[in-house]
Structures are given as C-alpha cells and as structure tokens.
Image: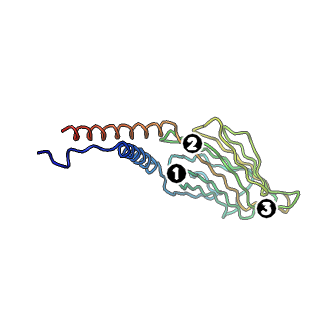
Amino acid sequence: MNSPFVNFKLKPGISRSLTGAALLLSTATLINAGESKAATFQCFLSNLSACGGILGDKDFTGFQISGYTPDASDKVTVMQLDDVWEVNVALNSFVNKTGTLKYNVAVTGTNFTFNETSVSVSGSNNATNKPSVASTMTGITAFTTTTANSETKTFTTKPTSIAVSQVFTAAPSRSINSFTTTYTQNVPGPLPLLGAAAAFGFSRRLRSRIKTSAAA
C-alpha cells in the first residue's frame, strides 16, 4: 500500500510559490554575501608616508599633501560603511591658505566599478569668499565645491581605479574646517544573472523530485 505521504501532487500555485521562494533565497544569499562591515583607518597629514589601507574591496594608496605645513592635529580619516567609502579631511586652523591632497583608490578582488563621488565642504564663508575644494578625478570632469553647495558626479567610464587630486582653498579671514569625499560603486552585471540561474536550477531539481515522488 502506498504511503499517504508519497502520492500527492502540488497545485500550480504552490509550484510557482516554490519557484519564487527559490529566487528569493538565492537573492538573499547574494545580498548577504556582498554585505560590508564598517571599517576605518586614520592618518595625520603631517605624516602620510605610511598612510593607506584596504577597506572592503577598495585599496587606498599614495596619500600626499603639498602647498602648506599641516597643523599637528590635521588628519585624514577613511571609512567604509556598507557600499559607501568616505574620505574626511579635518583641518584645525586652515585660514587664508591653499593646499593639495592627492591619493589613489583601486578596486581589488571584485568586479565592482566606481559609480558616483560626492564632495562637501565645512567652514566659514560670506557672500563673496567661500572656502572651496577643486577636485580632479580619473573619469570625471574637474569640478569645484564650496561651503554653499555639495557636488555629486557620476563616473561615466566605470573605472576600477582612480587618481584623486583636491586643491582646498580658504580666502582671507575665511576657514575650512573639513571636507568630505564619498564614493559609491556599481553592482557588477553577472551577479543578478548568476542569482537567477542558481534559483532556476534549484527550482528545476525541486520540481523533478516532486514529480518522481508523485509517480512512485
């Protein structure tokens, strides 16, 4: 006698639900695999010779500053939170000065590319004298940010490495307290396709087992 737990057939709606569940499971697995943990490193601007590090899949190297002598407490902090990387430069007494910060960022170990960058400036300003940061980056037309606005630009060439040069300027009796540059990335194209393929294969095997059990 056949067991009542063997002779059964799933309705089409249940089969579709299983397929959907497989897709969701595969997608959730990919999302969890790509999650990033918060990480950071910090360097004083007066000693950048050993400054750098890898946060997630982004390798920050070649930090250098020129044009002025940093204050003892001036520093750069690099942080990653999920899929956003932030470079913050804090200046203690940057009044009526000009300086240039340079560094490189490269993707390592993944298929991601750079998507957007955003620059914001904090400091004192008036109607005519606004502290500014003029940024030049690989794959983006040079742009200038002041304390009155923030700028977001898109890397249309989808680079995997960029060279960054930022000239920060404070006019007489104006000051820059800090400026922050963030980077986001593009999701590589193959991942969604791989996720769908894995889910499709899983659902096919599941349906095959169900048919085998029903025919027994």
- Look at the numbered disc 3 and give the secondary structure of its residue: strand
Residue identified by numbered label 2? 186
Q: Position of residue 116 (x, y in %)?
A: 64, 45
Marks 1 and 2: CB-CB under 8 Å? no
Q: Nearer the viewer, residue 14 or 102?
A: 14
Marks 3 and 2: CB-CB under 8 Å? no
- Look at the numbered disc 2 and give the secondary structure of its residue: strand
What's the residue type where badge 3 is placed?
A: Ser
Rounded to the nearest angstrom, the CA distance separating label 3 from label 2 is 35 Å
Label 2, residues with CA under 10 Å away: few <14, some 14-19, many ≥20: some
Q: Say whether disc 1 or disc 3 marks the residue closer to the N-terminus.
A: 1
What's the residue type where badge 1 is placed?
A: Leu
Tell whether 166 sits left or right of 40. Answer: right
Q: Say whether disc 3 or disc 2 marks the residue closer to the N-terminus.
A: 3
Q: Position of residue 38 (x, y in %)?
A: 51, 58
Q: Nearer the viewer, residue 200 or 75?
A: 200
Q: Position of residue 55 (x, y in %)?
A: 52, 51
Instruction: Kindly report which numbered mark, 3 or 2, lies closer to the viewer in this rendering.
Output: 2
Look at 57% across and 45% down and name the residue there.
185
What's the residue type where badge 2 is placed?
A: Asn
Rounded to the nearest angstrom, the CA distance separating label 1 from label 3 is 31 Å
The disc label shown at residue 55, or none: 1
Quadrant where the C terminus sits is top left
The disc label shown at residue 22, or none: none
- Look at the numbered disc 1 and give the secondary structure of its residue: strand
Residue identified by numbered label 3? 175
Q: Say whether disc 1 or disc 2 marks the residue closer to the N-terminus.
A: 1
Tell whether 36 sits left or right of 68. Answer: left
Instruction: Kindly report which numbered mark, 1 or 3, lies closer to the viewer in this rendering.
Output: 1
* Residue at the far left in the pictured view: 1
Q: Nearer the viewer, residue 74 or 133?
A: 133
